[in-house]
Structures are given as C-alpha cells and as structure tokens.
C-alpha cells in the first residue's frame, strides 16, 4: 500500500479518483496515507520494507504435528482464524 501512496503523490490525482482507478477502498487508502505521514512527522518511518522474501507458501505447524501449507496470497483474516483455533 505504501508504494500506492507514493504513486498517488506523483500522479496529481485526488485521493478518491486514484483509489477508484486502482480499485482500492478509499477509507483504507486514506488510512495508509495518514500512517505514512505520521511516520514521516515522527522522524522515522512508521513501516519498514522487508526485502529478500520471495512469494513462497505460508506454513503453519500446530503442536500436534499437523502442518498447513497455504499460498502466500492467503488473506490475513483467514490466517488469523487458523492461528487462533
């Protein structure tokens, strides 16, 4: 999302037009804009970019030995539900 915020800044478009064009929820987009601003104002980034990760599968291993392997694109809400069993 932060890369989208940077692209929006360079686009000259309004937030609403940019969000609509890129099929992003406007409220969520504004959240990320504000999060980036807040980090900049505090002198250190609110988020850090992690490099070196490829789009690999996600593994969850339970104490009983059962292991789930899920695609990297699995929604966080779904992952959270599997972790909080």
Image (cartoon, helix red, strand yellow):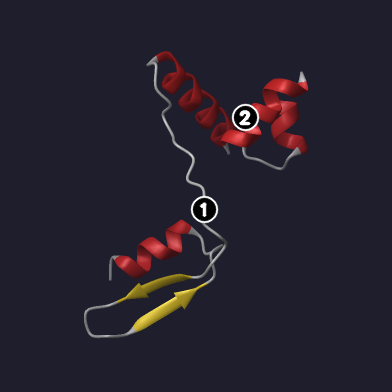
Residue extending furthest toward the bottom:
65
Which quadrant would the C terminus be assigned to in this image? bottom left
- Where is residue 48 shown, x and y percent of the image? 44, 36
Q: Mark 2, residues whose alpha carbon is within 10 Å: few (<14), some, or many (≥20)?
A: some
Query: Which disc is residue 5 wearing?
Result: 2
Q: What element does badge 2 sit on? A: helix
Which quadrant would the N terminus be assigned to in this image? top right
- Which badge, 2 or 1, comes first in the chain's sequence? 2
Q: Residue at x 52, y 64 (%)?
A: 74
Q: Residue at x 39, y 16 (%)?
A: 43
Query: Which disc is residue 2 wearing?
Result: none
Q: Is residue 14 visible?
A: no
Q: Residue at x 37, y 61 (%)?
A: 80
Residue extending furthest toward the front:
52
Q: CA distance from mark 2 to mark 1?
A: 22 Å
- Where is residue 82 shown, x and y percent of the image? 36, 70
Query: Which tag is nearer the camera, tag 2 or tag 1?
Result: 1
Say which residue label 1 marks: 52
- Where is residue 40 shown, x and y percent of the image? 46, 18
57 or 12, which lies in front? 57
Q: Mark 1, residues whose alpha carbon is within 10 Å: few (<14), some, or many (≥20)?
A: few
* Quadrant housing residue 47: top left
7 in relation to 49, above or below: above
- Where is residue 24 shown, x and y percent of the image? 66, 40
Total marks placed = 2
33 or 65, which lies in front? 65
* Quadrant housing residue 54: bottom right
- Report the side of 10 relative to 26 (left or right): right
80 in relation to 68, above or below: above
Q: What element does badge 1 sit on? A: loop
Q: Is residue 8 visible?
A: yes
* Quadrant housing residue 76: bottom left
């Amino acid at each position: 999302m932060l890369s989208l915020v940077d692209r929006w800044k360079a686009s000259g478009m309004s937030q609403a037009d940019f969000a609509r064009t890129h099929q992003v929820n406007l409220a969520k987009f504004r959240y990320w804009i504000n999060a980036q601003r807040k980090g900049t104002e505090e002198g250190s980034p609110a988020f850090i970019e992690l490099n070196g990760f490829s789009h690999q599968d996600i593994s969850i291993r339970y104490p009983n030995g059962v292991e789930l392997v899920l695609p990297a694109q699995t929604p966080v809400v779904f992952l959270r539900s599997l972790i909080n069993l």
